[in-house]
Image: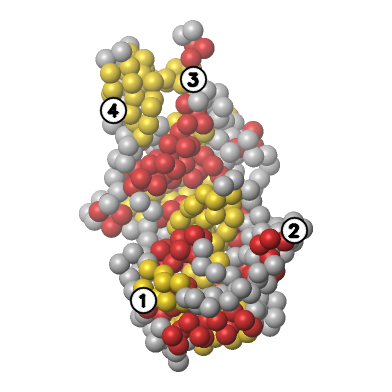
Amino acid sequence: MEGTRFTLDDMSAWEIIVPPTVYPPKEDTQMLCRVISELSANTGGKALEIGCGSGLVTMVLTSIGWDVSACDVNPFAVACTRGNMEANGISGKVSVIESGIGEDMAISENTDLVVWNLPYLDEEVEYPELLEKMEDAALSDIPQGGWGRALLQTLENNGAALCDKVLVILVMRTDPEGSSRVTDWENNGWSWRSLGIKRFGVEKIEVIGLWRTGSGVAATILDSCSSTMDEAAKLPEDGWQRVFSKIQTKGRGRMGSAWVSDKGGVFATWNLDVSLLENLSPGLIQTSIGAVVSDALCANMKWPNDIVDDNGMKMGGVLLESSNNEAIRAGVGANRNGFVKGEVMASGWEESLGAIDAFEVFLRIDRGISSIFESNRIMPAPTQERLALISWKALSRFLSRGVQASVDGRLLRPTGLNTKGELETFGDGGTVVLRELDGIGWIFSHEHA
């Protein structure tokens, strides 16, 4: 049996042999290995690989300093991993056992990282040409939540000590969505970040990083306060700190203006690490949070910080504050019901989401903001380009309705968002970059048709 030489960018090269009954390294394996190679060094950290197959991912983890345990339900895969490690001089450094999720496999509480290239072929579909050479379990998912949900339940059954610290990295099929779904993790209070995407024909495969939102730090909940921005300034500096208040009496908007709202809405502020400003502009941070809030409310975002309904009526907003090198305070206000107070008219999320409690909406927003900005000691932060794409996708829902910007009597058609969070537009005089909101009006196409 001939071996295959596998090289990962500037890292070591491994010579591996894979028998016909073991899943061989393919493009999804290579994508996972590249993601792993970009993790922060964690010498001595405890990692578990589930479904080790040929042993390649385990060898990559070991080469960058992880203390690895590995398992596979396929005895041929266990033997293959052990043989490849020995051939590459790694023998004795890794514990490899025949076991798997659903087989009383124990996950130690001191585990920092769990990695699994999930089986993602549909169980009910037959793949005779593919499966005749390997075990079905290496490729086929299971119904009712898939292997992803089975892993989630195993972790949750282990308790908070494990869930609050572990980072889970999964290879999942996200289009078309398989039995294993990110939403199962979201609904159980986990945040997630896409770390790699690749198309294989009609299927999209992603490497997803998942962790418990807040990593064990609970949100501060208040019955009432004057401003959650002011309350957030009193919170501890460590960890994912955020405050939610059931009532806010003196909320503020842009330029010190008053935030007019009704009881029952979301009034919350998150403390973000000031080091974010080393790589991200305040404008991009603001639009990224606006994208999260608009998604959570099934609403639209109007550049740079308003959350609006389909008619452009304001439903909520995002405000950033920071001073004296303190944490960036990101305030979010959102209305549950529409109202009219004097000259202020507003819409609410009951029009788009239905009768959902404010705290549940807060949790959705919390998971979304955490997924982008919560610091993780292992996983890389999203790039400027990724955040600009997230922001533009949210803005496009509003702009696709034929909305144009009006500046000094000129109509400008938005064409993109740059990595500073500035809106790029095009008009009679060519390209115009909008950096400030002042002086900008918004016009639906039917208003001047």
Q: Residue furthest top?
A: 449
**Secondary structure of residue under mark 1:** loop
In which quarter of the view is residue 235 placed?
bottom left
* Structural distance between the alpha carbons of marks 4 and 1: 44 Å
Query: Which residue lies under the disc numbered 4?
Result: 433
Q: Which mark is residue 64?
A: 1
In the image, 279 versus 129, the foreground residue is 129
Instruction: For mark 2, give the secondary structure.
Output: loop
Q: Residue at x 33, y 16 (%)?
A: 427
In the rendered image of this protein, does residue 237 appear above or below residue 225? Answer: below
Q: Please identify, in this view, whether the residue under mark 4 or under mark 1 is nearer the observer.
A: 1
Of callouts 3 and 4, which one flags the residue occurring earlier in the amino acid sequence?
A: 3
Amino acid type of the residue tagged 2 in the rendering: Glu
Q: Which residue is mark 3?
A: 402
- First-in-chain label (2 vs 4): 2
Return the x and y of residue 342 as percentages of the image width and height: 50, 23
The 10 Å Cα crowd at callout 1, few under 14, some 14 to 19, many 20 or more, is some
Q: Amino acid at mark 1?
A: Ile
Residue 317: x %, y % from top left: 45, 38
Mark identifier at residue 126:
2
Q: Position of residue 306 (x, y in %)?
A: 44, 34
Q: Nearer the viewer, mark 1 or mark 3?
A: 1
Residue beneath the point at 74% across and 58% down: 126
Eye-nearest disc, 2 or 4 = 2
Q: CA distance from mark 1 to mark 2?
A: 38 Å
